[in-house]
Amino acid sequence: MRRTRSGFKVHGSVRQGWRRLWIPLVPFLIAASAPQETITAAALLEQIRVLASPAMTGRGVGTPGIERAADHITREFQRVGLKPGGTQGYRQSFAVITGVKVGPKTRLRVVREGSDQKGSETIPDNLFTPFGFSEDGVVEGEIVFAGYGITAPELNYDDYAGIDVTGKIVLIMTHEPREKDEKSSFRDPNAYRYTEVRYKAINAREHGAGAIIVVEDPLGHQGEREELFAIRGVAGGSRAGIVAINARRRVAEQLLKGTGKTLIQLQQDIDQTVTPQTVLIPTVRLAIRVELIEERGTTVNIIGVLPGSDPVLGGTAIVVGAHYDHLGLGGEYSLAPSRYGEIHPGADDNASGTAGLILLARAFARRGGAKRTLIFAAFSAEELGIVGSSHYEESPPIQLQRTVAMINLDMIGRLTNRTLYIFGVKTGKEFADLIEEVNRYLDLTLKLGGDGYGPSDHTSFYSRKVPVLFFFTGPHTDYHRPSDTIDKINGKGLADVTRLVYQVIDRLANRPEPVTYVEVKEPRRAGGGRGYGAYFGSIPDFGSPDEEGVRLSGVRPGSPAERAGLRGGDILVEMGGVRIKNLHDLVFVLRSKRAGDKVEVVFLRNGQAVRGTTTLERRR
């Protein structure tokens, strides 16, 4: 037994045991001092307070609010001494469709037939408006009332059954039969897609209709103020392949006079029996002309670089990313469409991830960097389809071939029950052990997913064979709504998550070995499967939003897409007899199919059409 300087007696074997315990922790404790001092709940919440403030007006792409957010992030990167990594200083600009407005040639005319009719009548433009996804063009034809415009074979319901609408104009209502009946088969979560207006437009197109008119259904919304809801916010940049307009109910009532029934009577007949009441409207035709003017502008990624200290490893990079755009005042992507015009602050989505990004940059800068180069990227236009992260790859500060890993922070501000979701763990061979080691000292409950694809910016990197990790604290009911506010952020939890991410980056950036990329093949099971429909396994190239068809950056190994002969660079233009103009069409087809269905696909390779067949599988 020996007496220590402090006066406590410690047995020699115990002292040696402590030494064996503490010596391996020394690097961790040294590294931990920077995030502990810098990455605090107060500092993170202060960043969110700025980014989700009313002055940022929801950070909608193409708005002054997102420009103010970009300026703020730039100042933060400058303040800690990051080097500019964009094409214009810290800024990497790119073109986007920021909105759509109605052109002056847009018209809607009612053409009455028969000797006792009064000819044509122009509908005032305050009674209708085109949808932002409408095609431009002129359509004139007979009108068919097609109920809710739904084709749902698994629910034994089809508004188009028994009638040919080829070249005609279909008049439909919003929502679905028995909207407020909790026992309705349409309450199945997998049937929600039938209520989407864009689904109804594509369904009309695939039945041969020349145009579609959508009006609010009256029964489920009695007493509510009726408003035109088309063209709100950013349109998303892709057309639906059909002329589509939104009209007030009085227009529908005017057209339906020849049937002897009102709109509410027809809806009652459908809802009482859950049987379509499709009918050709006699003695009247419609002439529609739509002109849409796309508003284009630019937005920017903000990129800061912390050069690596090692002469060899410094030529390789870790990309740390978070998108800073959100929905502005709502619009097409808002889950609270009735609250259009209200600021959607996006405190969790994704001011939380952006705050984490800024504090990580600050912590590593104070630490003096790492052996590898760290690239901190605040991406724009993620909400439009991960456009910003796709554009990053056109002019990165360090080429993707020398990018060791990408770390993505998206919605990390609502830690609940200490549970953190980390996806992409199987995309790097070393990730699982590293994360387990780091979490040993932080004690979060981790839910790990292997796949490197998902609806956020890491997908852009994994599709280019970069290992990725995506950090996420889980979904909530305030997602894409004005209620995603700072008071619901868990500041302490956000700090804990950001510190864990710091330790992960620190280990990746200082280890001599690179991360071993793994092409993850997620197991699929045949039979069953609903949700988003059948599984195909294509990986869209999100950097080509204006292109006709869906260009692929790759296909998942062993997938139906691979068996059909598809590979990266191909452009998918048809599936199962349906034209594929954009991603919405691809989703429409897959949602209408089931596992085990055999489909023919048509794709372009080097400008030449290629056909293939495959059998779809169950979506995991």
Image (tube, rainbow, N blue to C red):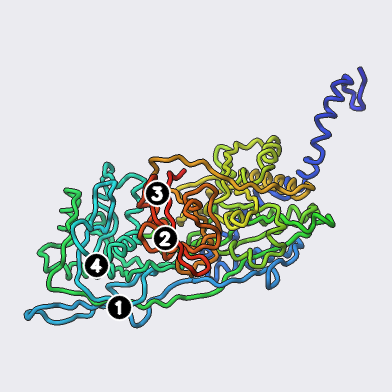
Question: Are the residues flagged by discs 2 and 3 in contact, CB closer than 8 Å?
Answer: no
Q: Which residue is more in the foreground, 610 or 524? A: 610
- Residue drawn where x is 41% and y is 56% of the image: 587
Residue under numbered circle 4 = 166
Note whether 264 is above or below 96 in the view shown. above
Q: Which residue is more in the foreground, 218 or 373? A: 373
Within-10-Å neighbours for mark 4: few <14, some 14–19, many 20+:
some
Q: Secondary structure at mark 4?
A: loop
Which numbered disc flags the more N-terminal residue, 2 or 4?
Answer: 4
- Residue drawn where x is 49% and y is 71% of the image: 98
Question: Are the residues flagged by discs 1 and 3 in contact, CB closer than 8 Å?
Answer: no
- Residue drawn where x is 12% and y is 73% of the image: 283
From the viewer's perspective, is the residue at label 4 or at label 1 nearer? 4
Q: Amino acid at mark 3?
A: Gly
Within-10-Å neighbours for mark 1: few <14, some 14–19, many 20+:
some
Which numbered disc flags the more N-terminal residue, 2 or 3?
Answer: 3
Within-10-Å neighbours for mark 3: few <14, some 14–19, many 20+:
many
Q: Secondary structure at mark 2?
A: helix
Q: Amino acid at mark 2?
A: His
- Residue drawn where x is 60% and y is 49% of the image: 470
Residue under numbered circle 3 = 533
Q: Position of residue 313 (x, y in %)?
A: 80, 54
Q: Amino acid at mark 4?
A: Thr
Which numbered disc flags the more N-terminal residue, 4 or 1?
Answer: 1
In space, the residues marked 4 and 1 are separated at their CA atoms by 15 Å
In space, the residues marked 4 and 3 are separated at their CA atoms by 26 Å
Within-10-Å neighbours for mark 2: few <14, some 14–19, many 20+:
some
From the viewer's perspective, is the residue at label 4 or at label 3 nearer? 4
Q: Amino acid at mark 1?
A: Val
In space, the residues marked 2 and 1 are separated at their CA atoms by 23 Å
Q: Position of residue 523 (x, y in %)?
A: 51, 41
